[in-house]
Image (cartoon, rainbow, N blue to C red):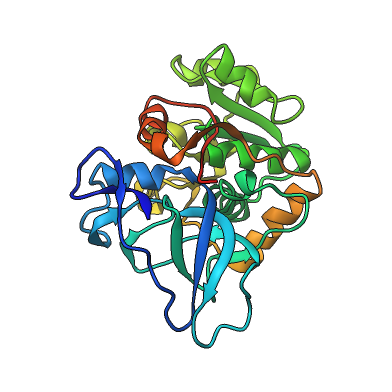
Amino acid sequence: MRALLVHSVPATPTVDDVPLPQAGAGELLVRIEASSVNGFDAATAAGYVQGMMEHRFPLVLGKDFAGTVEAVGEGVTEFAVGDPVFGVVAKPFLGAGSLAEYVVVPAASGIARIPDGVSATDAGALGLAGAAALDSLAAVEPAEGETFLVVGATGGVGAIAIQYAAARGVRIIATALPGAHADFVRSLGADIHVVDYTADLAVQLKDVAPSGVDVALHLAGDGQAVAELVRPGGRIASTLGFGPDAVAGRDLTVVAVMADTNAATLERLAADVAAGRLRVPVTTTYPLEQAPQAFADFGAGALGKLGITLV
């Protein structure tokens, strides 16, 4: 089968042939229709995850997937051949990812059915970013009327978190470049105040949050710089490993978030997409053979989610 892979890290991903995987006991073989590029995938190819997880080469990249169950392993009763499914590859090692024509995944974790009204392209870009967004919001619970700073708003996690926060009546302040990036962020909800992330954020926030913001979501940049923008008693969620030890002695609550891609979270995300409550921010799609270009565009700061299609 065709797959996007690296033979070592750091390396630039290439598309090549690898053997078709087989579903073992408790596993599903999924024929992939769509996937997407995540920051974790880029970090893996760049070698940043080496030492944190086992790497098996040739290493097929990819976490998100959407497709159809092709085969079920022994003992699987929750899913059947032909079921439309999506989710996030949940394995204790890296190497058998979803940027491929097929992927084998556990039937008991990181997978859910795709409901009617949700496209494979959207489902294939939803799992990891969506779970990270929901878990980040749950960690700090921005409430109606509070000021909520999203640093890194133009990526998948930020774009999804903004939509959920806007539905709560939160006053959203988001960082973006002027022009197309700012327009993209404003399209995610009403009354989003966009600030230029290349300029002095403290100066720009004086009028909208003179005492500091109530809550911040740290998805990009320096965590300490973000913490300086939060009022005493405020809360910060970070997907970049910025934790409470970094603000020891200060009156701030900081939570380092790791996305939990359980079935209940995936089902909630898909239901919200199906009901029109959530838009999956896929801005560009690429066929698998052009996935190396998608990685290059991701690294250059592309907006939203970059989808990979396989059919």
Q: Is residue 206 visible?
A: no
Which quadrant of the structure image shows residue 76?
Answer: bottom right
Q: Is residue 68 above or below residue 217?
A: below
Residue at 20%, 50% in the rendered image: 7
Residue at 45%, 54% in the rendered image: 101
Q: Is residue 186 visible?
A: yes
Q: Is residue 120 above or below residue 56?
A: above
Picture coordinates of residue 266, whole percent (x, y): 63, 60
Picture coordinates of residue 41, whole percent (x, y): 37, 46
| The N terminus: image quadrant | bottom left
Along the line of sight, the residue nearer the viewer: 234 or 105: 105
Residue that lies at the very extreme toward the right in this rendered image: 275
Which quadrant of the structure image shows residue 14?
Answer: top left
Q: Is residue 63 above or below residue 76?
A: above
101 sits left or right of 9 in the view: right
Along the line of sight, the residue nearer the viewer: 87 or 79: 79
Residue at 40%, 38% in the rendered image: 289
Along the line of sight, the residue nearer the viewer: 209 or 201: 201
Circle count: 0
Residue at 61%, 67% in the rendered image: 263
Which quadrant of the structure image shows residue 297?
Answer: top left
Picture coordinates of residue 159, whole percent (x, y): 60, 36
Residue that lies at the very extreme toward the bottom in this rendered image: 75
Residue that lies at the very extreme toward the top in this rendered image: 179
Picture coordinates of residue 244, whole percent (x, y): 41, 52
Q: Is residue 87 above or below residue 16?
A: below
